[in-house]
Image (tube, rainbow, N blue to C red):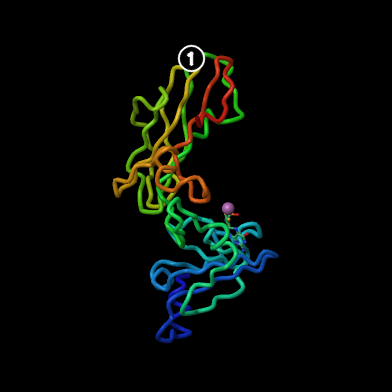
Amino acid sequence: MPLKTVLDEAGLQAGAKWIVAEGADAAALTRSIPIEKCLDDAMLVYSQNGERLRPQQGYPLRLLLPGFEGNMNVKWLRRLKVVAEPAYSREETSKYTDPMPDGTSREFTFYMEAKSIITRPSGGQKLTTQGFHEITGIAWSGHGKVKSVEVSLDEGKSWQQAELQEPVLTRALTRFRLPWLWDGKPAVIQSRAIDETGYVQPTLAELVKVRGLNSFYHNNAIWPWRIDANGEVTNGQA
Ligand SMILES: Nc1nc2c(c(=O)[nH]1)N[C@H]1C(S)=C(S)[C@@H](COP(=O)(O)O)O[C@H]1N2
Ligand SMILES: [Mo]
């Protein structure tokens, strides 16, 4: 159900700028959401896939903010407060605010920027044979559809177009795949997502250059996997 329906029913006073949503878990996850989002496509969710929400997913009611990072979707929703200022709750200050290299704070960054990750072969797995392996993973973006995913097999020197599995839906996980003949030599494989706005998933070095080293909660950087000569797959981040 659109959150807007409930807000229209209750009536909003002038000066309503934020809504503070609170969960009923022990941590009482509390997050501030701009009123524009609440009146746009925010949803109060009580079921998914034809059944009631499962307890782990926030039964009986969960906030869903399409395109925002999933951590904003408050589960076990017990309170919505319409206010003039954000709450500056524990999670949104100590965790999801990024201390920047120039001493400022990057706060209230809601949208999920394009990201992808190779799920096979990936860390902890082991290739037992040389030859054919399908590289596959998932990509997603809070800003719309995944336009393409590129895969590099040579430490980022060159990139190839992966195949996207249909249907490619806006702000939804999109599976990609690329056939690969492994010659048994050490290799670094990585993927990068490009979304319909043209945004290209950055390397970790590019991200660190802008955001510094004091934050990682919004890290959407490319994640490389290193494959050893014996087939073992480990974290390939230099
Ligand atoms: N009430 C409440 N909601 C919450 C959380 C929480 O701790 N309490 N965690 C958030 C975080 S950090 C994430 S990643 C997602 C996880 O959602 P999922 O369990 O459906 O995967 O829920 C979000 N909603
Ligand atoms: Mo999380």
What residue do we see at 35% from left, 49% from top? 145
Q: Quadrant of residue 190?
A: top left
- Looking at the image, the residue that sits furthest to the front is 102
- Looking at the image, the residue that sits furthest to the right is 26
Q: Secondary structure at mark 1?
A: strand
Identify whether 214 is placed above or below 11: above
Residue 201, percent from left and from top: 38, 42
Q: Is residue 54 left or right of residue 181?
A: right
Count of labels shown?
1
Specify few, some or many for label 1: CA neighbours under 10 Å numbering under 14, 14-19, or 20 or more: few
Identify whether 177 is placed above or below 7: above
Q: Amino acid at mark 1?
A: Gly
Residue 27, percent from left and from top: 67, 64
What residue do we see at 34% from left, 42% from top? 200
Residue 67, percent from left and from top: 42, 57
Identify whether 83 is placed above or below 53: below
What residue do we see at 59% from left, 75% from top? 79
Q: As rendered, which of 115 and 138 lies closer to the eye?
A: 115
Task: List the residue tagged with mark 1.
Answer: 131
Q: As rendered, which of 116 and 209 lies closer to the eye?
A: 209
What residue do we see at 36% from left, 45% from top? 146
Q: As rendered, which of 62 and 70 lies closer to the eye?
A: 70
Q: Is mark 1 within 8 Å of ligand 1?
A: no
Residue 122, percent from left and from top: 54, 30
